[in-house]
Image (cartoon, coloured by chain):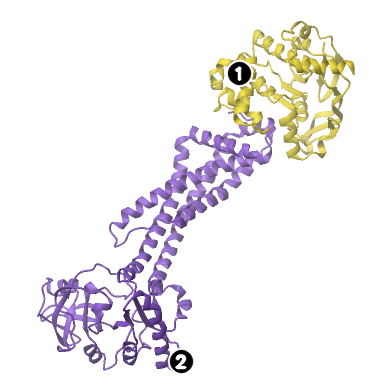
Chain colours: A purple, B yellow
């Protein structure tokens, strides 16, 4: 049987070579399908690494507290990202911030209250943007660096703001806007600092710091009718080693504050990235489904060509049978040929997919990933396609009556 | 003349083969009783459409939708699975077709090695055997030619080499010299009679009465029945013996004679 297998492979190679153009075009059909799937998986893999990498870049000793029970993860399997709407009425309170601040080994705690609204300069048109109300420690927890000026300071007036470089350009047409006034919800703020660009629109905070305005907690409270809706609390422990203990302590303390109701989640590491990643995986799943259609078309192409090939080689089938080939031998011969087409297309498609992903990623803020998982997926998909669409022509070939087959002329 | 040991290889009992349905129904083979002994060289003659080729296909296990009984070496063919039949074709039967039936996209040597694939011979051994047999047929220099680069006689010799490469005990030849001139025919018939002398059973369909002189038994068919069945003195094949038997075959023959 092993011998036959090797022979069938040699035979398939020969037969595909003798119809080079036809084989290449058929393989191309499969290659396009596999290429799109590979590109999608590589890019979505790259996308879902962004957030994880950011957390690593922050030093790995950060954790976030988010409202809503951690068990929500199951309900959210649909892949929602932490939007403002979802946390419209947050379960986190200012009291929680004060509690967390008292936990040992925590170096900084920063709440994030996200308001949306328009920002405008004196005479300019309003620019819709994200407004974050927080504390000065936000600069520390999120590693925010300033291009110019200073960060929020409790000793200054609460009506001061630090804005992202892009927002500055959007409102004033320049990145140099220190000391200028902007109006948020009817209240004037003095710009005391401009953030350095970090080009990270996708992050676990759900905001793009490049085009946000950061205001103080007090100002945020007064702009929101005196209530602070905290969407997230970022905290940083003094070292990676103490992070686990900090998370446990935070959980305990908050649970006490919330009278035993676990309506919050303390997350660290990959878990922080989860909601964002869920979104990416849903997008990837949807696009993969579309790519699967092209794969189906490619598979039909294989079936079509194999049927032609079987018809063309009817006489050969008759000869082989007369010379002692069993039906199983004939099935194997044609099945291996269609597998050769699909696997050839799969390999080509895998390479094409990566080139495509690399090309596309030059326009995106992340790189495609290269994993064994994707290679395995591509391999399995091509084998399944080859078998699925090669089986019918192969069985048809084997069922041919040898006498009729021999009677047919080349 | 080769010694015929009285072991029946093929026994046909009231064999019938029907084509068509209803009004178009017609028996291509209409009740044939035939016993073929091991080592016979049978020539089947008859006009076109009398069922010669159909009979040959049935004997070669290519057509198993038959009525009546066909026993091949004491086993009724009807009881054999298609896999088993394929196995017998691969081990025991060699086909020589009228229209050569080489696979056009394969080289001569690959064509000749083809039956060995299904016998499970390794590639090196396959090519070795095929090469050896091609040398026997004086085609050693044509091994890597494509079939279309050969003359008719050469092509038919390749086809015969292919039929013989797996050392079959039964050789079925359908007009092996059908398209060839008399010289090429002669060479091929010499090969066949040589094989016959080595103890193979040969069943040959032919239109050419001159070729029957090589045979040990001539059967004429008419309308799906056997019309005449005569043993002939096999002069030509006696005279045409060129090559002595191989050592092994000779020993075997001796043993058979003493037994």
The reply, left or right, for residue A138 in relation to residue A240 is left
**Residue at (45, 47) in percent of width and height:** A347
Asked if one can make out residue A225 in the rendered structure from this viewpoint, the answer is yes
Q: Where does label 2 land, which residue?
A: A260
Helix, strand or loop for disc 2: loop
Q: Where does label 1 land, which residue?
A: B155
Marks 2 and 1, how far apart in space? 93 Å
Classify the position of the N terminus of chain B by image quarter: top right
Circle 1 packing at 10 Å, graded few (<14), some (14-19), many (20+), is: many
Classify the position of the C terminus of chain B by image quarter: top right
> Viewer-nearest of labels 2 and 1?
2
Instruction: Specify the quadrant of the image occupied by residue A183.
Output: bottom left
The percent position of residue A21, horizontal first and vertical second, equals 44, 36
Asked if one can make out residue B40 in the rendered structure from this viewpoint, the answer is no
Residue A381's place in the image compared with B147, above or below, is below
Instruction: Specify the quadrant of the image occupied by residue B93.
Output: top right
């Amino acid at each position: 049987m092993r011998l036959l297998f090797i022979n069938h492979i040699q035979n398939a190679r020969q037969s595909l070579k003798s119809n080079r153009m036809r084989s290449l075009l058929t393989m191309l059909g499969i290659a396009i399908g596999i290429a799109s799937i590979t590109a999608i998986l590589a890019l979505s893999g790259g996308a879902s690494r962004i957030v994880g990498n950011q957390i690593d870049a922050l030093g790995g000793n950060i954790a976030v507290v988010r409202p809503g029970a951690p068990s929500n993860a199951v309900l959210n399997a649909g892949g929602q990202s932490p939007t403002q709407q979802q946390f419209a009425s947050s379960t986190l309170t200012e009291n929680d911030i004060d509690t967390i601040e008292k936990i040992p080994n925590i170096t900084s705690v920063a709440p994030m209250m996200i308001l949306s609204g328009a920002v405008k300069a004196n005479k300019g048109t309003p620019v819709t943007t994200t407004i974050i109300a927080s504390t000065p420690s936000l600069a520390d927890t999120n590693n925010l660096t300033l291009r110019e000026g200073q960060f929020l300071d409790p000793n200054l007036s609460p009506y001061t703001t630090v804005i992202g470089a892009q927002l500055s350009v959007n409102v004033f047409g320049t990145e140099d806007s220190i000391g200028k006034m902007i109006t948020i919800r009817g209240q004037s703020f003095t710009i005391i600092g401009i953030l350095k660009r970090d080009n990270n629109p996708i992050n676990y905070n759900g905001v793009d710091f490049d085009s946000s305005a950061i205001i103080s907690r007090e100002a945020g409270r007064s702009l929101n009718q005196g209530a602070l809706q905290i969407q997230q609390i970022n905290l940083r422990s003094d070292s990676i080693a103490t992070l686990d203990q900090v998370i446990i302590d935070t959980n305990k303390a908050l649970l006490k504050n919330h009278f035993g109701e676990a309506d919050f989640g303390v997350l660290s590491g990959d878990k922080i990235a989860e909601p964002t990643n869920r979104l990416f995986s849903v997008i990837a799943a949807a696009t993969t489904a579309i790519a699967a259609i092209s794969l189906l078309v490619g598979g039909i192409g294989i079936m079509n060509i194999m049927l032609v090939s079987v018809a063309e080689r009817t006489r050969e089938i008759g000869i082989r049978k007369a010379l002692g080939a069993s039906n199983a031998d004939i099935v194997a011969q044609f099945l291996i040929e269609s597998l050769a087409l699909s696997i050839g297309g799969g390999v080509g498609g895998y390479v094409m997919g990566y080139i495509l992903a690399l090309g596309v990623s030059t326009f995106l803020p992340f790189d495609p990933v290269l994993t064994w998982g994707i290679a395995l997926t591509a391999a399995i998909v091509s084998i399944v396609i080859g078998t699925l669409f090669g089986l019918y022509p192969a069985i048809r070939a084997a069922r041919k009556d040898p006498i009729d087959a021999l009677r047919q002329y080349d | 003349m080769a010694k015929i040991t009285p072991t029946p290889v093929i026994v046909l009992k009231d064999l019938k083969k029907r084509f068509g349905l209803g009004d178009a129904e017609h028996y291509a083979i209409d009740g044939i009783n035939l016993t073929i002994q091991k080592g016979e060289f049978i020539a089947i003659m008859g006009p076109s459409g009398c069922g010669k080729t159909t009979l040959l296909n049935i004997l070669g296990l290519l057509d198993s939708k038959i009525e009546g009984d066909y026993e091949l070496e004491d086993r009724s063919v009807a009881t054999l699975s298609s896999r088993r039949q394929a196995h017998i074709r691969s081990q025991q039967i060699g086909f020589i077709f009228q229209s050569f039936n080489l696979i056009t996209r394969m080289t001569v040597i690959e064509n000749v090695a083809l039956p060995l694939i299904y016998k499970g011979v390794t590639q090196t051994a396959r090519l070795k055997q095929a090469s050896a047999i091609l040398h026997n047929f004086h085609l050693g220099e044509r091994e890597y030619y494509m079939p279309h680069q050969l003359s008719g006689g050469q092509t038919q010799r390749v086809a015969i080499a292919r039929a013989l490469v797996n050392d079959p005990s039964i050789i079925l030849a359908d007009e092996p010299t059908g398209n060839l001139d008399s010289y090429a025919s002669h060479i091929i018939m010499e090969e066949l009679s040589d094989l016959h002398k080595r103890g193979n059973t040969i069943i040959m369909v032919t239109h050419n009465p001159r070729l029957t002189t090589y045979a040990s038994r001539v059967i004429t068919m008419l309308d799906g029945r056997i019309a005449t069945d005569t043993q002939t003195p096999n002069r030509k094949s006696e005279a045409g013996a060129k090559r002595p038997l191989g050592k092994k075959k000779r020993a075997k023959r001796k043993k058979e004679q003493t037994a």
